[in-house]
Amino acid sequence: NAGVTQTPKFQVLKTGQSMTLQCAQDMNHNSMYWYRQDPGMGLRLIYYSASEGTTDKGEVPNGYNVSRLNKREFSLRLESAAPSQTSVYFCASSWGLAGGNTGELFFGEGSRLTVL
Amino acid sequence: AQSVTQLGSHVSVSEGALVLLRCNYSSSVPPYLFWYVQYPNQGLQLLLKYTTGATLVKGINGFEAEFKKSETSFHLTKPSAHMSDAAEYFCAVSGPNRKLIWGLGTSLAVNP
């Protein structure tokens, strides 16, 4: 059972470089999310996709773009990385928005990004 | 609007002692409430949830939480801490707009 798979797990970038974080889920979930986690700030939602074909901004979307490639895959792109984007990024998925009736989100193991 | 406050960013207990992690919420409608756990270098996983019905809910690894509407609280407890319980714990609330609002997390340390 793979669940939610994120790649890469670690990445070091220089300021101004671009990169894409990949996320795939094999649970046939409708909704997918990208969060960032920073010390003392908890989880902050960057973007989410309620269903295939839709994406919406979360709390902190600036500097990021997303693509819901198909039902399984949801990628996060940093077009011009900045040191403030140094963080741990988590992808999550769920049956319905905010977990639907079960309320459960399933998380990947995280991608640790450092921007120098 | 919903909000979540976790009291205490760091909690330290001795092995075998009671674990109590506090969570208070605000919500204009009956909330769905959740506790998630994050072990070191891992993603979050659901520990337990309250949606409707019984106000005392049991989760994995011996944890439980009680929904107290009058106190707007959903505190997480475990009678006897184990070393393996050391982790970050997040409380979250889901409201009518179907968005999850997260607390800032409480880091639990368990001392031998």
Image (cartoon, grey):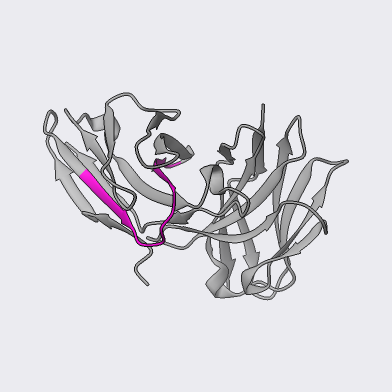
Q: Position of residue B47 (x, y in %)?
A: 60, 62
Which quadrant: the C terminus of chain A? top left
Q: Nearer the viewer, residue B35 or B30?
A: B30
A14 to B112, vertically: above or below? above
Q: Position of residue B95 (x, y in %)?
A: 66, 36
* Residue at figure coordinates x 75%, y 71% from the top left: B79
* Residue at figure coordinates x 56%, y 59% from the top left: B46
Q: Position of residue B56 (x, y in %)?
A: 80, 60
* Residue at figure coordinates x 22%, y 42% from the top left: A114
Asked if residue B101 lies left or right of residue A57, the reply is right
B14 to B72, vertically: above or below? below
* Residue at figure coordinates x 37%, y 33% from the top left: A55
Which quadrant: the N terminus of chain A? bottom left
Asked if residue A111 lies left or right of residue B97, the reply is left
User: Where are the magenta residues, as a range?
Assistant: A21-39
A65 to B52, vertically: above or below? above
Q: Nearer the viewer, residue A48 or B40?
A: A48
Q: Is residue A25 magenta?
A: yes
Q: Nearer the viewer, residue A103 or A14?
A: A103
